Image (tube, rainbow, N blue to C red):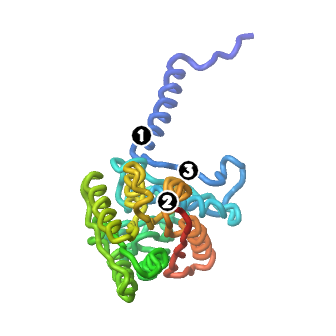
Amino acid sequence: MKGVKGPGLYAQIVIVLVALLVIFGGLVLMFFLPGTFNSGNNAQENGTDRNYHFLVLGKSSNISSLEQVFRGADGISADYNTVVELYVPETLADDVSLEELFNYATFVNADGIIAYVDTDYSTIKTPRRTDGSEIPVITLGHYTQSIPQVSFIGTNYSELGRTLANECIDLLNKNGAVYLFANELENNPNYSNMMNSFQNILSVYRGMSLQTLSVSGTDGDIIDAIRSIVLSDTNSGRTPLLVCVTEEDTIRCVQLLSEFHLESSVQLLGMGNNETLLRYFERGAIRELVYIDQEKIGRTAMTELIEYRTTGHSNNYIAADVEILRGGK
């Protein structure tokens, strides 16, 4: 009785080539869609079916905020039997347009999108699933009418300006110098609204003064400007209050204050609550931190997507809460 022969050499070669093509195709896909891709409660890993698959996406420059938004959304995903995934290009060089990120959502057949928007856009088509149905989009950050969104969750910048001004008044006991570190804020309409509110509140108090530090050059230029205000206010017997209104500027200024041993000469009111800033805050290098609770925004965005998927309705606009960490030196 003859034995059964295995596949011939030709068939074996074909099998190997097919396997290599599959692997190569996967690598090509990863190359053209470079990003940070994290899954929460992955359905395939735990062997259960999920009701929905949502994406949190945006540009690499907003990765810190997006990671916090993702943690908030993912933290309650099990309550809604939903998979939440974060997709952000790894570097600025890998960044793609918002529309291309939406195309990726179509590619993976997402049921909903939470997108961080940092600029105005002209016309962006409504993202759709492979069956042609619309993918609901909730936007964060910068409101743009041209984006087909079912809800916007953002900061009330006038309220943020009032909050910052009131904190300055309390820190200086209604009498002192406030220096606003403005690094290219003039072109941002949101910050314009914030500044109008900020200035209007401070102007009520005669003992308060406000000066804008328009410094966008080197670290040396920044530290020279800070030394100048330290010298001016030391001569007047006051400790100046430096105010930064972005996470990036707060990190830059506190690192320079620390490097040049000026932490005790300047009070710093900063913006944000990432791990780096919290470490400086705990050391006393930052007097106060004002921030938007991004994890809470993630939870809110998740519930709004679920509401829209189940009822067809959601809140058009939701104001994010402003939080304050007080303490420091």
**Real-space Cα separation, disc 2 to disc 1, in angstroms:** 26 Å
Residue at screen point 49% across, 31% down: 18
Q: Secondary structure at mark 2?
A: helix
Is the residue marked by circle 1 packed among few (<14), some (14-19), or many (20+) residues within 10 Å? few
Looking at the image, tell me whether mark 2 or mark 1 is earlier in sequence order: 1
Q: Amino acid at mark 1?
A: Val
In the image, what residue type sits under mark 2? Answer: Leu
Q: Which mark is residue 28?
A: 1
Type of amino acid under label 3 = Asn
Where residue 180 appears, as percent x and y from the top left, is 34, 70
Give whichever of discs 1 and 3 has the lower sequence position: 1
Identify the mark nearer the N-term, 2 or 3: 3
Question: Could you tell me if residue 109 is visible in this image?
Answer: no
Q: Cβ–Cβ below 8 Å for labels 2 and 3?
A: no
Q: Which residue corresponds to mark 2?
A: 66
Residue 192, quarter of picture:
bottom left
Residue at left offset 32%, top offset 77%: 210
